[in-house]
Image: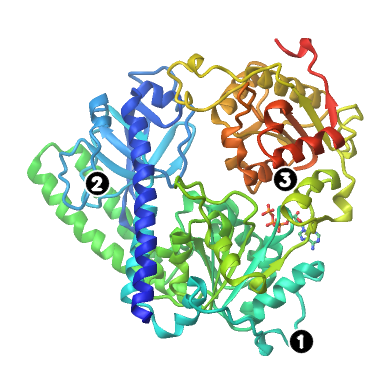
């Protein structure tokens, strides 16, 4: 097959896939918005109603950023209701606030009129009393001052970037990038010869790296196209990547470091920032950890050659925009807008010069996969692209930075959850696909974990990592009572506990879920009570709230346990398994929820989901579930139940536990 035909076929397949999943996600999000009234959406944290405008200003890129607060005409409190909005969420802003506006799904394009009652934007900041949104349309009239509401939408921007990447491929894939491209798409076998000049006389900056980490560093530096670093939970992927990056920079290489999430990127920025390497973090400052803000492009470029000019123009724009709010004359408004448009042009020109100056000086650029598609990076090239958490990203997301790469280093663990996409076939991340097509010769395995007690480590190691994952000696024997503030009790002296409800406490009937947004999810009030009891006992033994997390496969169960704990005045981190990937706690309580006569475990059935849940704890794992339902669903679950019955402390469900 010719080069052109190969690229065409590959990109076409990816494009179709992106369109398919985009359609499903958007349809699902829209269906929820149509099905439920605004108060229910607000109760479930995906809408805020009865807001009013509190300020307007100019943000990065010259965008209009509005701040909204609760309208005192509708509420005695100025604190926003509990919500799940966070920076980066795409929202629809409705003016006039009524139900019908929400239901009229409007896609806001370049030509939309200013009279459109709804417009889209991206959340830049969420505070206790206000929420800020960067509006997508630069020419937007400021919204009406009152009667505003926002609802969360599916994130179209991410999909559009993925599609743009695929389209860009076909037009513009330079010859020098073809070897990597062919290796990544499987048209050729990976070249695994190591470049001597990269690994000769290698001295490690971090001498505490274990042997498997050192091997991974050496391989990643020497290999010419592709390295996959397979790091099971707690094995120091980030540690290893930090060493790889420092070594690459020392050899004069320019590196683009990306991650599937802002947090994964910031974790690396945090650890590299002490070494005095010129670097910059792209991304909206509101989405970054406070500790990395000084490295953000926004902050660095403001002190660049044209920083003061940009700041001055930004203030002028704000002054003009605030004048618009005060004037009623249409003619005057038009005049002011004309002026704002001129100012925005200047703003963008000077800002672009600042940004490119700042990027030119940086040996390392950090951003999310999606951020790698931003216009600031359009003309930048890198010797090496590193992707952390690669197994949690969509293939098309990984292609965004890889379009500009000659060599790629991907770190991840395909035995944990891949991206949550709703397709008929199981989804393979790029990381997993590459392991399949290129085999173990491109892989380095990190085999020592620094998180879990040896017994907690045992089942995941045997089941998911061929028995090769070993605990570091300093963590192998730790249990809760070894923490200086925890007492020795029968719940703190062992690593694994199991409340087997044994078919006696069945899951809740979906009919009882009423109009809850979670009525398609699952819950089990008995298990929720056992979880609350266990949490109370651990707190009584001295463990702190922040040492624990509750994990369950179902959002309805999360909501139920949260409400029960709230009544007891307890606030503990909790989430569905998918949300806690990448986290760790001293103690994890895992509620399985499913208990029925049909032996159905549904959502729980995915082995990788189980792996994520049971590899979060350091010293204490407590499983609450019905062994009888779970055991008979597959050989895999039977093995897990046998393991628990053999190795865990099995706890009785005393009637007094159940309220
Ligand atoms: N060689 C080492 N010696 C001692 N401790 C180490 C070593 N490598 C990693 N660690 C410790 O292991 C823990 C996990 O490290 P790190 O955050 O780099 O791992 P990770 O693989 O990125 O984590 P995750 O599994 O959450 O993705 C950290 O507390 C780190 O200090």
Q: 10 Å neighbourhood of mark 1: few (<14), some, or many (≥20)?
A: few
In terms of secondary structure, where does tag 1 sit? loop
Badge 1 is on which residue? 201
Residue pointed to by mark 3: 615
Q: Position of residue 344 (x, y in %)?
A: 25, 59
Q: Nearer the viewer, residue 54 or 639?
A: 639
Q: Position of residue 31 (x, y in %)?
A: 34, 32
In the rendered structure, the answer to whether residue 140 lies left or right of residue 458 reads left
For the point 79% across and 56% down, the residue is 469
Q: Which of pointers 1 and 3 indicates the residue nearer the eye? A: 3
Q: Is residue 297 above or below residue 527?
A: below
Tell me where residue 524 appears, x and y as whole percent: 62, 21
Classify residue 121 by image quadrant: top left
Q: In this orientation, which residue lies closer to the viewer: 343 or 99?
A: 99
Alpha carbon of mark 1 to alpha carbon of mark 2: how far?
Answer: 60 Å
Q: Nearer the viewer, mark 2 or mark 3?
A: 3
Furthest residue to the left? Answer: 331
The residue at which mark 2 appears reads as 321
Distance between the alpha carbons at the discs numbered 1 and 3: 37 Å
Residue 351 in view in this figure: no
Quarter of the image with the C terminus is top right
């Amino acid at each position: 097959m010719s080069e052109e035909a190969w690229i065409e076929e590959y990109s076409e397949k990816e494009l179709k896939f992106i369109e398919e999943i985009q359609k499903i996600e958007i349809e699902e999000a829209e269906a929820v918005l149509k099905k439920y009234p605004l108060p229910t959406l607000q109760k479930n944290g995906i809408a805020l109603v009865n807001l009013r405008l509190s300020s307007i200003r100019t943000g990065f890129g010259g965008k209009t950023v509005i701040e909204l607060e609760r309208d005192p005409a509708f509420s005695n409190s100025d604190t926003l209701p509990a919500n799940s909005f966070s920076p980066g969420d795409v929202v629809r802003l409705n003016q006039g606030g009524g139900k019908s506006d929400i239901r009229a799904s409007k896609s806001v394009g370049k030509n939309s009129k200013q009279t459109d009652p709804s417009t889209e934007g991206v959340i830049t900041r969420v505070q206790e009393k206000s929420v800020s949104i960067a509006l997508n349309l630069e020419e937007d009239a400021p919204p009406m001052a009152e009667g505003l509401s926002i609802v969360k939408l599916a994130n179209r921007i991410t999909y559009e970037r993925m599609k743009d990447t695929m389209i860009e491929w076909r037009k513009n894939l330079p010859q020098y990038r073809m070897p990597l491209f062919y290796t990544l798409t499987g048209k050729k076998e990976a070249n695994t010869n190591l470049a001597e000049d990269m690994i000769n006389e290698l001295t490690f900056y971090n001498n505490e790296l274990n042997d498997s980490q050192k091997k991974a560093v050496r391989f990643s530096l020497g290999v010419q196209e592709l390295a996959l670093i397979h790091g099971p939970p707690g094995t120091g992927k980030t540690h290893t990547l930090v060493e790889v990056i420092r070594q690459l920079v020392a050899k004069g290489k320019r590196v683009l470091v990306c991650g599937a999430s802002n947090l994964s990127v910031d974790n690396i920025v945090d650890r590299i920032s002490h070494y005095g390497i010129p670097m910059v973090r792209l991304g909206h400052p509101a989405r970054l950890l406070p500790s990395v803000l000084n490295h953000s492009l926004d902050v660095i470029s403001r002190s660049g050659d044209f920083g003061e000019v940009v700041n001055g123009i930004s203030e002028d724009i704000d002054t003009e925009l605030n004048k618009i709010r005060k004037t009623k004359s249409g003619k005057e408004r038009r005049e002011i807008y004309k002026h704002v448009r001129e100012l925005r042009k200047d703003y963008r020109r000077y800002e672009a010069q600042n940004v490119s100056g700042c990027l030119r000086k940086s040996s390392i650029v950090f951003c999310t996969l999606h951020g790698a598609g931003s216009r600031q990076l359009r003309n930048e090239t890198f010797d090496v692209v590193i992707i952390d958490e690669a197994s949690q990203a969509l293939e098309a997301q990984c292609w965004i930075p890889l379009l500009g790469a000659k060599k790629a280093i991907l770190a991840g663990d395909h035995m944990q959850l891949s991206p949550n996409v709703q397709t008929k076939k199981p989804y393979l991340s790029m990381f997993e696909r590459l392991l399949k097509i290129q085999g173990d010769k491109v892989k380095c395995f990190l085999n020592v974990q620094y998180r879990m007690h040896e017994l907690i480590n045992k089942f995941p190691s045997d089941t998911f990592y061929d028995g090769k994952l070993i605990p570091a000696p300093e963590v192998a024997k730790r249990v809760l009572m070894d923490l200086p503030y925890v007492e020795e009790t029968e719940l703190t002296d062992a690593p694994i506990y199991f409340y087997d409800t044994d078919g006696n406490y069945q899951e809740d009937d979906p009919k009882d879920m009423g109009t809850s947004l979670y009525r398609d999810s699952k819950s089990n009030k008995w298990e929720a009570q056992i979880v609350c009891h266990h949490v109370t006992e651990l707190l009584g033994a001295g463990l702190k709230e922040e040492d624990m997390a509750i994990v369950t496969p179902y959002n309805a169960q999360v909501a139920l346990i949260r409400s029960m704990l709230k009544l007891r005045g307890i606030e503990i981190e909790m989430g569905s398994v998918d949300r806690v990937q990448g986290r760790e706690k001293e103690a994890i309580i895992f509620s399985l929820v499913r208990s029925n006569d049909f032996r159905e475990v549904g959502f729980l059935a995915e082995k990788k989901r189980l792996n994520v849940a049971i590899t979060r704890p350091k010293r204490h794992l407590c499983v609450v579930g019905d062994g009888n339902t779970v055991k008979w669903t597959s050989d895999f679950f039977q093995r897990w139940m046998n393991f628990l019955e053999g190795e865990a402390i099995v706890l009785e469900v005393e009637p007094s536990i159940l309220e």
